[in-house]
Amino acid sequence: EVHLVESGGGLVQPGGSLRLSCEVSGFIFGRFDMSWVRQAPGKGLEWVSGISADAGSKYYAESVKGRFTISRDNSKSTVFLQMKSLKVEDTARYYCARDLGMNTFGGQGTLVIVSS
Amino acid sequence: DIVMAQSPDSLAVSLGERAAINCKSSQSVLYSSDNKNYLAWFQQRPGQPPKLLISWASTRESGVPDRFSGSGSGTDFTLTINSLQPEDVAVYYCQQYYRAPVTFGQGTKLEI
């Protein structure tokens, strides 16, 4: 069974930074692309970023390009999302998911609140 | 970016009846080299993470009831739910993974 545990969310002021982590089990992590998807309160899903299995390719939504950085540590079955210059509109629950698309989700996400 | 537009935004259907949700992409998501549509459907129940229902426009995931079906090609797709059950109350999203950035439709809220 695919198991993903997101962590690192919290309350941060506008302009601040956070680093999200997602620890994975239940599949061979190093063979799969990974993504971050977010959902603002009461809103729809927004794909944020993706990374290839070998970390050779990284992709970003326009809304976060230049501010967020995705990375992974295949030895620890963990994917990260470094978020900088956070804006109020980045407030959301952040999910990690397997694959770039047709994603498999397995965790409850981690809540990021950007507020002064 | 490829824009995904769903219709309707919300839908109320009686138990046992059929629901149909449409999804239109701003450009074709049919990849000519493999003749596959890079289109998925997700279900999100209240308070839960999204669940993948259908990939490649019409391939049901393991464990998904056969009352769920996907159809369409190119730019126009439909998710059909036959014989609606109480547990089908959810928000449904289409997603294209033809080209990065991956994009979702705005969601369709299905109610009884």
Image (spheres, coloured by chain):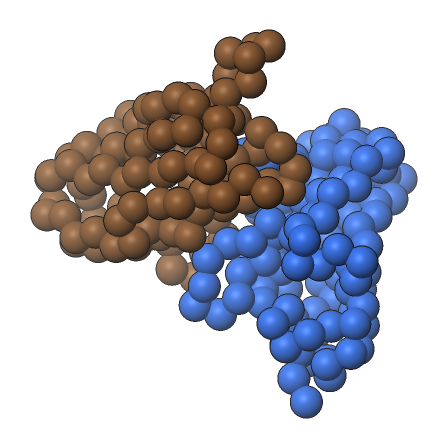
Chain colours: A blue, B brown
Residue at the (60%, 10%) spot, across then down? B33
Give the side of residue A109 with respect to residue A13, left or right.
Answer: left
Q: Residue at x 54, y 40 (%)?
A: B2
* Whole-percent x, y for residue A85 in the image: 79, 72
Q: In x, y percent, where is residue A63?
A: 66, 59
Residue A84 falls in image quadrant = bottom right
Query: Quick one: A48 or B66, which is closer to the camera?
Result: A48
Q: Residue at x 57, y 33 (%)?
A: B97
User: Is the residue B40 above or below the residue A88 in the image?
Assistant: above
Judge left or right: residue B50 versus residue B23. Answer: right
Task: Check the picture and name the quadrant holding the C terminus of chain A.
Answer: bottom right
Q: Is residue B70 left or right of residue A90?
A: left
Decide if residue B26 is on the left or right side of residue A79.
left
Where is residue B34? Give x, y as percent: 57, 10
Does the rendering let one see residue A29? no
User: Does residue A103 sit above or below B56 in this rendering?
Assistant: below
| Above/below status of A61 relative to A98 | below
Image quadrant in which you'd find residue A13: bottom right
Q: Nearer the viewer, residue A9 or A16?
A: A16
Residue furthest front as drawn: B27
- Asked if residue B37 is positioned above or below residue B93 in the image, the reply reads above
Q: What residue is at 55 percent from the left and 44 percent from the top?
A: B103
Q: In the rendered image, is residue A90 in sight?
A: yes
What residue occupies the far bottom of the structure in this picture?
A116
Q: Horizontal and vertical percent for residue B47?
A: 43, 61
Q: Quadrant of residue A104?
A: top right
How many discs appear?
0
Q: Locate the N terminus of chain A by quadrant.
A: top right
